[in-house]
Image (tube, coloured by chain):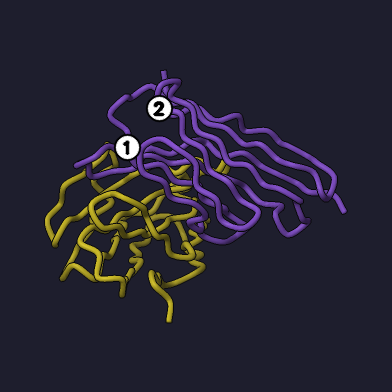
Chain colours: A yellow, B purple
Amino acid sequence: DTAVSQTPKYLVTQMGNDKSIKCEQNLGHDTMYWYKQDSKKFLKIMFSYNNKELIINETVPNRFSPKSPDKAHLNLHINSLELGDSAVYFCASSQAARAAFFGQGTRLTVV
Amino acid sequence: QKEVEQDPGPLSVPEGAIVSLNCTYSNSAFQYFMWYRQYSRKGPELLMYTYSSGNKEDGRFTAQVDKSSKYISLFIRDSQPSDSATYLCAMSPSGGNQFYFGTGTSLTVIP
């Protein structure tokens, strides 16, 4: 049973489209995150939710909007996709920021 | 200055060698220290997790934390080709709500 699962694994779309990525965790953690990983493998925090409440909102274009319907789910919606949005997006969860557990990633390619 | 510094490598070693991976940090509030292994096109996988200073061993892997020097290490004994991956260090402060990642070190173990 996968601890943190995100869908889809691959996403290829045209510029200007709107897309969503979904994430679910079954670890019972209170906090969930979205990270963006660039080509040099650096993990950059985008958003964090604790018990459905937004607690970290880094400098990210407002075309990116997270939503947490409950503490086990965190989705990411991206409007008006741009070429520069191409990256791997990781969902993660943790309990009190002690150790993060990651999903397998969504490789987004904007063409 | 970045919060966490990690030599990106790449590091290439022969099979059976002892590998030493290191990170330095500047924030003395960090209390939780993690090492992740990331295979190509996969999500980061939690390898080792330690709290405060000291050593922790798990099979061929040993994590060391020296808070006085703000320095953490991961040692891999009897390295195997299957250890070839990118290794990321991460840390978080007690009571904090996010993780601070190194940039990752790319390791190749040559058979």
- Residue at 49 percent across and 69 percent down: it is A9
Q: Residue furthest right?
A: B111
Q: In which image quadrant can residue A67 be found?
A: bottom left
Q: In which image quadrant can residue A5 be found?
A: bottom left
Query: B94 left or right of B88?
Result: left
Q: For the C terminus of chain B, which image quadrant?
A: bottom right
Q: Residue furthest top?
A: B1
The span from disc 2 to disc 1 (Cα, nearest Å) is 9 Å
> Tag 2's secondary structure?
loop
Q: Give the vertical position of A11 relative to A90 (above or below).
A: below
Graded by Cα atoms within 10 Å as few (under 14), some (14 to 19) or many (20 or more), the crowding at tag 2 reads: some
Q: Are marks 2 and 1 on the same chain?
A: yes
Query: Residue A45: image x %, image y %?
Result: 34, 44
Task: Pinpoint the chain carrying mark 2.
Answer: B
Query: A40 left or right of B12?
Result: left
The amino acid pointed to by label 1 is Gln
To which residue does mark 2 refer?
B67
The amino acid pointed to by label 2 is Lys
Query: B7 left or right of B111?
Result: left
> Tag 1's secondary structure?
strand
Graded by Cα atoms within 10 Å as few (under 14), some (14 to 19) or many (20 or more), the crowding at tag 1 reads: some
Residue A80: which disc?
A: none
Q: For the N terminus of chain B, which image quadrant?
A: top left
Q: Earlier in the sequence, mark 2 or mark 1?
A: 1
Query: B81 left or right of A81?
Result: right
Query: Residue B106: image x %, image y %?
Result: 66, 42
To which residue does mark 1 refer?
B31
